[in-house]
Image: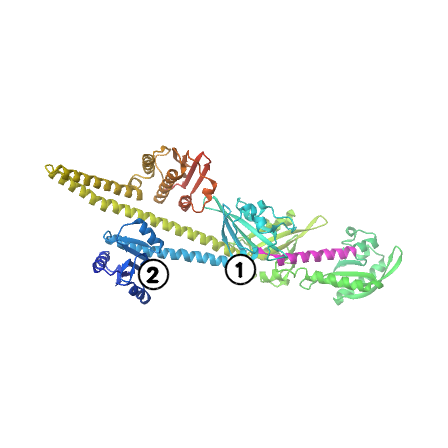
Amino acid sequence: MNSKPIHVLLIEDHPGNVRLLRELLDNTGTGAFVVAQVDRLAAGMEHLDARAIDVILLDLSLPDSQGTETLIKTHAAAHGIPIVVMTEVDDEELGLRLLQAGAQDYLVKGQTTASLLARTLKYAVGRKRLEEELREQTRFLQSVLNSMADGVVMADDTGTFRVWNPAAERILGSGPAGRKIGQWSEHYALFLPDKVSPYPPEQVPLAKALRGESVTNARLFLRPSAHTDGLWLDVSARPMRDESGQLKGGVVVFRDITATKRTDEALMDSEDRFRAIMDNSPALIFIKDLEGRYLQVNRQFETLTHLSQQDLIGKTDDQIFPADQAQTYRENDRQVLDANAPIWFEESALHDDGLHTSIVVKFPLRNAQGHRYALCGIATDITDRKQAEETRQRLTKDKLLLLESTGDGIYGIDTAGRCTFINSAAARMLGYLSDELLGQDMHECIHHLYPDGTAYPRECCHIHDTLNSGTGCKIDHEVYWRKDGTAFVVEYSSFPVIEQGQITGAVVVFVDITERKRAEQQLTLSHDQLRNLSARLELVREEERIRIAREIHDELGQELTGMKLELSSLSDQMQAADPTQRKKLQSVSLLVDTAIQSVQRIATELRPVVLDQLGLIPAIEWQTHEFQTRTGIQCTLDIYLRSVALSHAGSNTMFRVFQEILTNVARHSQATAVAITLQEQTGNLVLEVRDNGRGVTESELSDPHSLGLVGMRERALLLGGETILAGIPNGGTTVTVRIPLSRPQSA
């Protein structure tokens, strides 16, 4: 099946060059290239606007434009179309300037073959497409981060910030700063929950993640200059590791929970007020269940009856008061329950100082769903009637609003797991009416299956464990199931309810974290896609080296060898010639020998023949010998295996990393000796290179401009391996490379 032809715009004014280039492209195959030619830069600009072009083949010397300015103008008008420049001279410095000015590649006139021209054009188009794909992936990742309401910050293992989304800048009040890890707490004004004590630098969640620790839902207080009242943050942090488990950095996700925190504080204040009223009110207050048993009494009730709350709870009026007094209380209680409304009564009771008459208001208690579950009575002297009414209203309001003042789902269960209460937010997230869940087994209703649909045994449930052990928990990797059969990921916390030393139930608070989990998965997927793209680019570069090395060796090498043979034949024929002429012939022959050696050296540097023909171990031995010969640095090589079960890509990677290590030794180490070891350890091929030079420094290891070190790490990482560098001042540098070995598959 023929591939789509590549449309080439040739901007060249020399007819001979135009004819030659067309012939070269025609020789690459029928229909592979469609060429449109113009002889002026201005005409080329117009052509770009009128037709679809895949690649531009540009001559720098045109009647209406000369030199690098021609490329600059073309690049500005090309709008991303790759440009291959044709030059008159083979000058690497010129080539570098052209690439910096926007060219994808350059060719030297008179040295271009049909295959080289075709390959250069195809590679230019291919590279441009790969660059566009990489940019698209980057834009997608940035879009995900920009759309998140939570702040996301990522730092590498040196503490340098790499990701800082808009939400993070909005919440923190500033962008990333070049601060050391120990200065983050002070710079970003982080405080402990007491709002006074600075957050310990070593306990900052991101700092802990960079040490390999995880932090979940830490609470800290932030007082940036833009928020004078301060902000409460909920922070989670995780270390980032590569495939081999090597710590590469840390990521922290945080959100502003100031409103939630204030709501929680308001709820706590409300509960404290309720208890304070109960225990400090001069009124006599009690709560009975629907059977007349006391559920709760206040301190004033204990004082007047001379009985403790423990003695009163669970007993009826018949067990506490005289028979006639108890009967009056029961009749009044029944009226209230029958009327299902508050009723005022005048009741008498004998106190230590005599008979007291009180105005007693009795009323049924209802839960958040409006169901009656108890009866409450407040008794006061007639003179205190107003105070009793205010107390009743406050208590009623506090009880009704307690569960409805938060957006988190909250429900309670008894020791059997049955729902005792549930707020509206919880019922809404679960797709039920509140009444449908009260009294139901919550595990069987919403928590009976794992995320994959398999049964979730009750004895394995963390909430069930809270009922048994009395220990709370926080879980963020399970799901709840809605009434319609769909599931959503939740983060829930369960807390035991302990009364009189006994566990009587549990309270569960949960939030839907589906979107947060989805964002985390998308972020992980984007990282994997970028790494795969990098691996593909590395493969393309290695294949290009192999092709170039083969062409240099096979074509240019053969031509030089033929020239050498011709010169030898000519030398034989000129035995009787003038000595001066024979000396010139010998000089030319020596130049040809030098050229042959250069061709062999260049081809070998691009792709050593020994690596392809004999394998990695001979290639390591050859490279060690070459390095020692070239630099004079004494090398010792110890190889503790006969063969290497490594893939072709693994052999390439190990050899290229070895070359880069030796290059760094020669350039930077000031070493006089190098010890090299190659061996197998626990399923990995391990290469260790140790020199006696000055020793690499920590700043050099963390320098983002040390492209050689970064390249070594990335090459090994793409194959699931790792590269570790360690240096001692004036004690040398040790580089250890580990790559997983290929295992033969069993028959």
* Left/right of residue 245 with respect to residue 173 in the rendered view: left
> Dividing the picture into quarters, in which one does residue 55 lie?
bottom left
* Of the two numbered discs 1 and 2 in the rendering, the one whose residue sits closer to the viewer: 2
Q: Quadrant of the C terminus?
A: top left
Going by the numbered disc 1, the residue's amino acid type is Thr
Residue 317's spot in the image, x, y percent? Answer: 81, 57
Compared with 739, 177 (above or below) is below
Going by the numbered disc 2, the residue's amino acid type is Lys
The residue that mark 2 highlights is: 73
User: Which residue does the image show at 47% across and 59% down from the upper left?
Assistant: 143
Circle 1/circle 2 CB separation < 8 Å: no
Compared with 50, 99 (above or below) is above
Nearer the observer, 479 or 632: 632
The residue that mark 1 highlights is: 486
Q: Is residue 439 magenta?
A: no
> Dividing the picture into quarters, in which one does residue 123 lie?
bottom left
Which element type, helix, strand or loop, lies under badge 1? loop
Secondary structure predominantly adopted by residues drawn in magenta: helix
- Residue 297 visible, this angle: no
- Residue 407 visible, this angle: yes
Which residue reaches farthest right? 354
Which residue reaches farthest left? 576
Residue 636's spot in the image, x, y percent? Answer: 37, 32
Q: Which portion, as a residue range, is magenta?
A: 255-280
Residue 525's spot in the image, x, y percent? Answer: 45, 53
Q: Is residue 263 magenta?
A: yes
Circle 2 packing at 10 Å, graded few (<14), some (14-19), many (20+), is some
> Dividing the picture into quarters, in which one does residue 48 lie?
bottom left
